[in-house]
Image: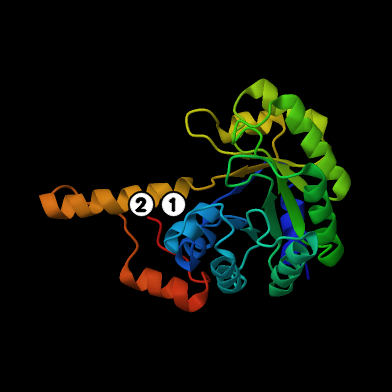
Amino acid sequence: MTTHAETFRALHHAPRPLVLPNAWDHASAAVLAAAGFAAIGTTSLGVAAAAGKPDATGDTAAETLALARRLAGLPCPVSVDIEGGFAQTPEGVAEIAAELAALGVAGVNIEDGRPAGTLADLAERCETIAAVKSRAPRLFVNARTDTYWLGAGGLEATIARLRAFAEAGADGVFVPGVAADDDVRALVDAVDLPLNVLFLPGRHTVDGLAALGVRRISTGSLLLRAALHAVTETARAVAAGGQMPTSLPSYADVQALAAAGADSPLDQS
């Protein structure tokens, strides 16, 4: 039988890019799985926001691991955002990655951005990637650089980091914040690994990114932010007697997701 890890790896080499929606709790992940998405990722901002904590500070390791345990039973591959790795040493990060792999998690994101708006030392990041691959060889390591996201480097600096990540054993590379077609194409051409791009509304389309050679498209915190907007707008509609959204999941639908681990299809009509 094909494992989730094998399926997840194959999805990066399919005819169409993998559109990876990012969830922040069991319900959001289960509803996406029930809707038919081939794989689910997590969003560190969503996990942090749900816990009442700031993002990208390394303070949500417990919440992230607890969520991974809950999502491991979903009927599709799951990739977990572990920020910078939730540990101070490459060996510590590798230990967390091995724990996730043992749960059945198919992949992880590891980033080089730091809370102060700087980039981690490149040699240390490469050592961490190598340590993770040594401890969990089947885990898909998506190595993220925040050069564009933090405005901490341009195209040449980004390519240098991606090539170093590839040499260290990364399975894919992720450049959130890159928008221009020429830059995306140059990144695809520069590294012989699947390129992951963060979907930017108004700047990207799936078809456009596919034509440039992008293999994975993440939604990041977009779905969380859309959900928070829907919460506010629905509450306002109740208070003001406005128009309510239609086709909402029922109480029974949500109960079914929790009870069946997304095995029961949600009515999307």
* Res 103 → quadrant: bottom right
The amino acid type found where label 2 is placed reads Leu
Quarter of the figure with residue 43 = bottom right
179 versus 142 height, above or below: above
Is there a contact, CB below 8 Å, between mark 1 and mark 2?
A: yes
Rendered residue at 69%/52% (across/down): 110
Q: Nearer the viewer, residue 94 or 175?
A: 94
Q: Is residue 231 above or below residue 70?
A: above
Tag 2 residue: 228
> Element under label 2?
helix
x and y percentages locating residue 92 in the rendered image: 75, 66
Tell me the residue at 65%/32% (across/down).
Answer: 152
Q: Is residue 13 left or right of residue 134?
A: left
Q: CA distance from mark 1 to mark 2?
A: 6 Å
Task: Name the residue located 69 percent from the left edge and 69 percent from the top edge.
Answer: 100
- Tell me the residue that label 1 is attached to: 224
Q: Nearer the viewer, residue 92 or 38?
A: 92
Residue 266, x across and y down, in percent: 43, 64
Disc 1 secondary structure class: helix
Q: Position of residue 51 (x, y in %)?
A: 45, 64
**Is any atom of residue 84 visible in this view?**
yes
Judge from the rendering whether residue 262 lies leftward or rightward of residue 174; answer left or right.
Answer: left
In this picture the colour scheme is: rainbow
In this rendering, does residue 245 appear at all? no
- Quarter of the image with the N terminus in it: bottom right
Which of the numbered marks, if any, corresponds to residue 90? Answer: none
Vertical side of 4 occupied by 162: above or below:
above
Q: Amino acid at mark 1?
A: Leu
Q: Position of residue 124 (x, y in %)?
A: 80, 50
